[in-house]
Image (spheres, rainbow, N blue to C red):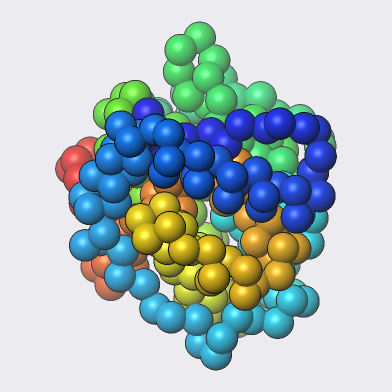
Amino acid sequence: MLISAIPRGTHDSEPDQLLKQRRDFIARTREDNPPLLRAWQALYREVAPALELPALPAGLPEPGTFLRGSSGHTSIVKLPNSLKLRLPHAATQLILELLRDSVWQRRVERVFARSFWHTNGAFFETVASEGKACIAGSDGPLLGHVLAIAHELGHCLYDEVNGWGSTAALFESEAAAFVVEDVMVRAVLASAADDPALALKDWSHYLELQDSVTRHFCRLETAEVIAGETELSRAASPEFLSSRRSYVERVGMQWAYGFAAATRRRLRAQVARSSIAGALSFITAGRA
Ligand SMILES: [Zn+2]
């Protein structure tokens, strides 16, 4: 696997320490592990053409825009208050209603049935159950539940159709997660928000901010891994950088998120005019 876990020398979770571990690992690899460095370079060459994302609107957003001390891999941007909606039903029920009578209904029912539902708030991930991907997370009537469950559902559906294992599958699975998250949230907003047009506009703005933060982390990954530079990351605060868990835990993962965000941007225009099932069909169509 070319996405590399950063070894932990200590249990220290201070932002400065996490960043030092990342920088040290990359520097050691550049000096002592040419095969791994070449693998990272090859991965970057393959994905670079697909990483076109918008720049941050005006420098880095205000610190208050971000989740602090978040456990999120990508969810570094806070959901605006206007999108913290309480919905008429739990997220899993709403998602199933949106997919009723589509080819995806049975697949989604199977994923939900084997998933692990807990009441422990904000933590969601895709895990394996008897060799199949399922969700570990909490269900509930908030838009945040729809967002988080739809993201993991995208991973699970990609796994059902295509399987895991390769780096390409990891990248495409992330794209599936980003796309499913977007189409489900938009469908729920269209049917449940008091002012759907305004809510959809707020959601689009949120994704723009999210994508531009992702672009920033992609550029950091490229500067550090490919060019061996650390100036860009030293210009940002350790708290900002370390709140992106995927950044301090792994090398290469920011390119996967960049690929996923760029794929979602490309698909958005056509997805906006088609059915949810049509939007999901990109999962079965192979590389987007
Ligand atoms: Zn994901």
Q: On the rendered structure, is 41 left or right of 117?
A: left
In the rendered image of this protein, does residue 52 appear above or below residue 114?
below
- The residue sitting at 31% across, 63% down in the picture is 51
Q: On the rendered structure, is 33 left or right of 38?
A: right
Q: Residue extending furthest bottom?
A: 58
Q: Residue extending furthest top?
A: 130
Q: Where is residue 168 in the image (x, y as percent from the top left)?
A: 28, 38
Q: Can residue 152 be seen in this view?
A: no
- The residue sitting at 36% across, 72% down in the picture is 53
Quarter of the figure with residue 162: top left
**Foreground: 238 or 123?**
238
- The residue sitting at 42% across, 63% down in the picture is 223
**Foreground: 167 or 211?**
167
Q: On the rendered structure, is 101 left or right of 82?
A: left
Q: Can residue 224 be seen in this view?
A: yes
Quadrant for the N terminus in the image: top left
Q: Position of residue 73 (x, y in %)?
A: 60, 49
Total tally of numbered discs in the picture: 0
In the rendered image of this protein, does residue 164 appear above or below residue 189?
above
Q: Where is residue 200 in the image (x, y as percent from the top left)?
A: 51, 76
Q: Position of residue 158 (x, y in %)?
A: 35, 35
**Foreground: 62 or 101?**
62
- The residue sitting at 75% across, 55% down in the picture is 16
